[in-house]
Image (cartoon, rainbow, N blue to C red):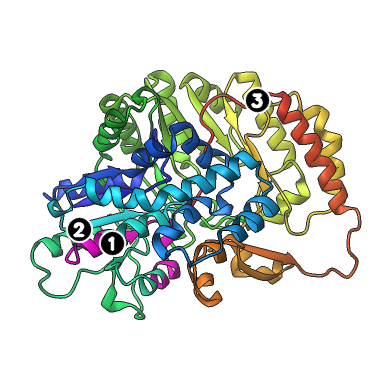
Amino acid sequence: MLLIEAPFEPLQRGRLAPALLKAELQQRGLGCDVEHLGHAFAALLGRDEYGRLIGEVPPAALASDWVFAEALFGPSASDAGAYVSDVLRSRWRLPRDLVDLVVRARRLAADFVLRSLAEIDWHRYAVLGFSAPVGQTVAALAVARAVKQYRPDMRIVLGGPAWHGVMGRRQLAAFAFVDAACTGDGDDAFPAYCAWVVTGCEGPPPPGLLPRRGVGRSQRHLPTDGLDALPIPDYTDLYRALDRWGGDSHGVQLAAEASRGCWWAARRPCAFCGLNGHTPRYRPKSAARILSELQEQDRRWRPWLIDLVDNVVPPAFLREVLPQLAESPLAAHLFFEARPELTRAQLRLVARAGAHLQLGIESLSQHVLDLVGKGTDAGGNLRQLAWCRDEGVPVTWNLLHDVPGETARDYRELRELLPTLRRLPPPGGRGPVEVQRFSRYFAGPASFGLVNVRPTAAYRHVYPFKPAVLRDIAYLFDADPAPPVCADPDLEQERAAFLRELDEWLALRPRAPGHVKREVA
């Protein structure tokens, strides 16, 4: 079996899905390699330039997908100039050098796909799998299409966050070279499918994946339970890629998980969050397994950082695992996300464990927090930041703006708060709230005063599909505010003034130390 990490994967960051699937396949006696193609593309483009595309271009611009759109659909599928003008310049106002870099990367993409076809011995493999988050989907499809043309008998499976639910069903129907789609967790379904292929495809395919001949039929998604039984992720191939392409193996960040889902969202999800919407049930690992997995990854791989990729760590982690890590810290830094409700004693444990923290603060306006259903209070958020400063905890947090229902008064109050904020750890980033598939904004826009929900503008420049198809494959959406009875005439002016003052402050302050987590589906 061969698993592909397509561009634009972060070069020194090991993603959980391929490493875990590799270990699960090996556990069943099936051989598996992982190819990290991002390293090869970075060698063509330049490693620094590759990093800029990941770190400086907003994910909602879909630049990573647009780079490979011509390699997948052909040169006549879209107007390159229109994308540059409408999305990169007008919508996101990217600097000229960054726009030029995106265009240069696109010119390399088709040749890169051909090089990949020539440099990998595809005859060694029976199944080719891709786990595609937003930003790696079109590159994965371009490689998959080329391989299918070269080896028509190769079974090709795509899955990952960009293929969950209806997105996977619609893309399977649209791309005839894909043999099956994983529309949810693949821990059991993908190895079972691989075993079915290896044994000659006798009988119907196993449940869990959506096979091509099942397009249009309902498919029962099988979420993974019993997470303690999963193997330790295998990152061998990431280190091989770093050795081969001259990467720095001393700065590696590896992913681990303590749970799937969000224990808060299982009761009432935040309005903007679409993560795990296809499987809202919360599934934690036991405290003993979390600790043993972290210690095993630390011992086996010696990474610079281990990132718990949970939406939010389970209460058992804070209650049982964190005290043990404070007594016997890992050699690696640890990074995790928590709700901004930690006690001061817990933050002292975070500091003693050498951990870096992301707090789900989102706003310092109580009205805005209530609008998004965060279930926290602005005063508590400020207190958490002050305690992190006092206890020496490296912390990052994000600030949302353009929230449906916000008022000019919210921004006036935030501007008044800025002198106090300058004494606290600054946000790692700020950005407009997004409408994500599976979120409450998407499911019930009218209740949040939103109308005209449609795929974000970049999709029509990437995919040559009709609007109905784009709506089914999109994860990110734009929406308009419903016309109010009495518009707030000062809102845009107050928002712009606050953001200008916020950016002036951020430009003068160093970013909080440690890893900054990017929540991309």
- Residue that lies at the very extreme toward the bottom in this rendered image: 216
User: Could you tell which of marks 1 and 3 lies nearer the N-terminus?
Assistant: 1
- Residue 127 got which mark? 2
Which residue is at 26% across, 68% downward? 179
Q: Nearer the viewer, mark 3 or mark 2?
A: 2
Residue matched to label 3: 387
- Label 3 to label 2: alpha-carbon separation: 51 Å
Dots 1, 2 in contact, CB < 8 A? yes
Which residue is at 40% across, 69% downward? 171
- Residue 157 got which mark? 1
* Residue 57 % position (x, y): 57, 44
**Left or right for 3, reference 351:** left
Give the magenta part as a residue range: 147-170
Which residue is at 66% across, 53% downward? 433
Q: Is residue 105 above or below residue 86?
A: above
User: Could you tell which of marks 1 and 2 lies nearer the N-terminus?
Assistant: 2
Q: Is residue 513 above or below residue 465?
A: above
* Magenta run includes residue 165: yes
Q: Visible in this render: residue 227?
A: no
* Magenta run includes residue 469: no
| Amino acid type assigned to the residue bearing label 3 in the image | Trp
| Amino acid type assigned to the residue bearing label 2 in the image | Val
Q: Visible in this render: residue 179?
A: yes
Q: Residues within 10 Å of mark 2 (few under 14, many from 20)?
A: many
* Residue 265 % position (x, y): 54, 55
Label count reads 3
